[in-house]
Image (tube, rainbow, N blue to C red):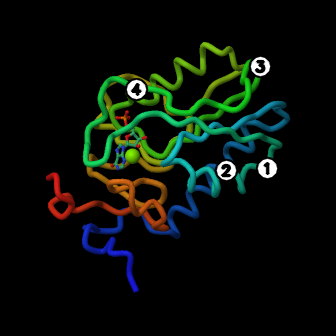
Amino acid sequence: MTDGHERYLQEVLISEERLRQRIAELGKEITTDYQGCPGLVLVCVLKGGILFLADLMRHIQVPHGIDFLAVSSYGVGARQSQGEVRIMMDLSSQISGQHVLIIEDIIDSGHTLRYVMEVLQARRPASLKLCALLNKVSRRRVNIQVDYTGFEIEDRFVFGYGLDLDERYRNLPFVGVADLSQSGDA
Ligand code: IMP
Ligand code: MG
């Protein structure tokens, strides 16, 4: 039995083991940096950030809450993020006075995160930082500071470990490079 992802998989870019190791390191780093800090809340950007959040939070040994935010991203089949971003689902709690750490799957042009950070900053958190699993530095169009980065990657379309290929295969335990010639809109 197979879910058919092999057809779209050019290569495994980051294995399950490398993800595990790096995420444990990030968790340690965050634990050190937020030691004794009251009111830490991890804000996961849906949907891509869920696997990263679930694994990372197990390595953060500081009391913290979690919350979720959904933003419009690439539509099915689209591979470019438009400059326009919208909030599709807002946080469930107020963040004023809280130490907010945004948990995101990937930063590409930076449009999405710049918008999210502006919206959250306006709510006056005690601090606002950004943790991204993947960072496509060469694709950056707007300047944003990434406080914690899992991996810097080249400009290739990736999927798995939370990232989708037309809304599928977020469940893969590794990050793979997509063979877009197989997915219909190349
Ligand atoms: P940005 O606004 O261009 O930085 O795009 C960020 C969003 O685009 C991410 O949160 C992802 O949902 C999506 N994205 C960017 N690159 C990829 C990729 O290689 N694979 C899957 N989704 C991606
Ligand atoms: Mg996506």
Q: Quick check: 84 left or right of 174?
A: left
- Compared to residue 23, the image places residue 17 above or below, namely below
- Compared to residue 69, the image places residue 154 above or below, namely below
Task: Give me the disc on residue 85.
Answer: 4
Relative depth, front residue between 94 and 55? 94
Tags 1 and 3 touching, CB below 8 Å? no
State the separation of the CA atoms marked 2 and 1.
8 Å
Q: Which residue is mark 3?
A: 97
Which badge, 1 or 3, comes first in the chain's sequence? Answer: 1
Task: Give me the disc on residue 146.
Answer: none
Which badge, 3 or 2, comes first in the chain's sequence? Answer: 2
State the separation of the CA atoms marked 4 and 3.
25 Å
Which badge, 2 or 1, comes first in the chain's sequence? Answer: 2
| Mark 4 residue CB less than 8 A from any atom of ligand 1 | yes
Percent position of residue 176, x then y: 35, 63
Q: Quick check: 67 left or right of 117?
A: right
Task: Give me the disc on residue 27.
Answer: 2
Tags 2 and 1 touching, CB below 8 Å? yes
State the separation of the CA atoms marked 1 and 3.
21 Å
In the rendered structure, which amino acid carries the disc numbered 1? Gln
In front: mark 2 or mark 4?
A: 4
Q: Residue at x 75, y 36 (%)?
A: 34
Task: Give me the disc on residue 61.
Answer: 1
State the separation of the CA atoms marked 1 and 4.
33 Å
Tags 3 and 2 touching, CB below 8 Å? no
- Compared to residue 172, the image places residue 85 above or below, namely above
Q: Residue at x 76, y 40 (%)?
A: 65
In the rendered structure, which amino acid carries the disc numbered 3? Gly
